[in-house]
Image: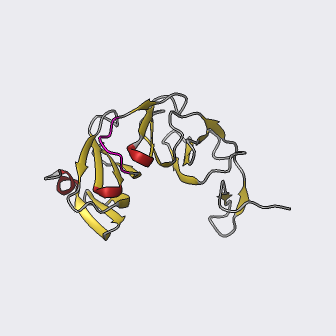
Amino acid sequence: MYKRQAYGSYYETTDGGTTWSSRWISDDDWHLHKIARAANGNLYIAAEGGSFYRSVDGGETWITLPTEYQGSYFGVLPLEDDSVLLFGLRGHLFRSDDAGESWQEIDTGTVAMLTDGQRLADGTVVITGLGGTVLTSTDGGRTFTLHQQANRRGISAAVETGDGSLLMVGEFGVRTAALSELTAGSD
């Protein structure tokens, strides 16, 4: 019997991570890149091939929702209510205000791969990516400003620290920087 590995693999635990079981949430064979939980409990998964999945029952069942782009998505960021951002290859960034039922593309000003997103405590939305890409939004993720880092080193992931800075991992190793540092003097 053929058993698929990696592509489309979905693992779950019911005992805090001591044991895991795998199952398939879709007939698609795409890599599942990022899972995120919205404040309302919805779960979202960004995947390859323009694939996007939503669960409204804690991951028991999943539905595939159509998107506007057939490339790979590497990140998903739930916002307020049913609003969600979906982003990935070639600077593609989409917003849905109905939990993924419909999408509108947001101009990013870049073709760099977008890798991670955070909503900071002050409400600022930050999307990071390769080539030193930092996108910021102060209007709840409706529009973004590109801040290209001079060193052009890719940012794989970022999280907000307790002092309002971002702890980032990327081609530069591990670095902490204030958002004002990342948005000042960019070209």
Q: Position of residue 4 (x, y in %)?
A: 74, 60
**What residue appears at the point 60 percent right and 42 percent down from the top-left corner?**
53
Q: Is residue 116 left or right of residue 47?
A: left
Q: How many marks?
A: 0
Q: Position of residue 26 (x, y in %)?
A: 70, 45
Residue closer to the observer: 3 or 138: 3
Pick out the residue farthest to the right: 1
Q: Is residue 120 magenta?
A: no
Q: Where is residue 93 in the image (x, y as percent from the top left)?
A: 41, 40
Quadrant location of the N terminus in the rendered image: bottom right
Residue closer to the observer: 96 or 122: 96
**What residue appears at the point 41 percent right and 41 percent down from the top-left corner?**
92
Magenta stretch, main secondary structure, is loop
**What residue appears at the point 52 percent right and 33 percent down from the top-left corner?**
99
Q: Is residue 162 left or right of residue 66?
A: left
36 relative to 42, above or below: below
Give the color scheme: rainbow, by chain, secondary structure or one colour: secondary structure
Q: Would you identify the image quadrant in which residue 50 lies?
A: top right
Q: Position of residue 21 (x, y in %)?
A: 72, 62
Q: Is residue 50 left or right of residue 160?
A: right
Residue closer to the observer: 179 or 1: 1
Q: Would you identify the image quadrant in which residue 104 lies?
A: top left
Q: Is residue 110 magenta?
A: yes
Q: In this view, does 72 lie to the left or right of 60?
A: left
Residue range highlighted in magenta: 107-112
Pick out the residue farthest to the left: 185
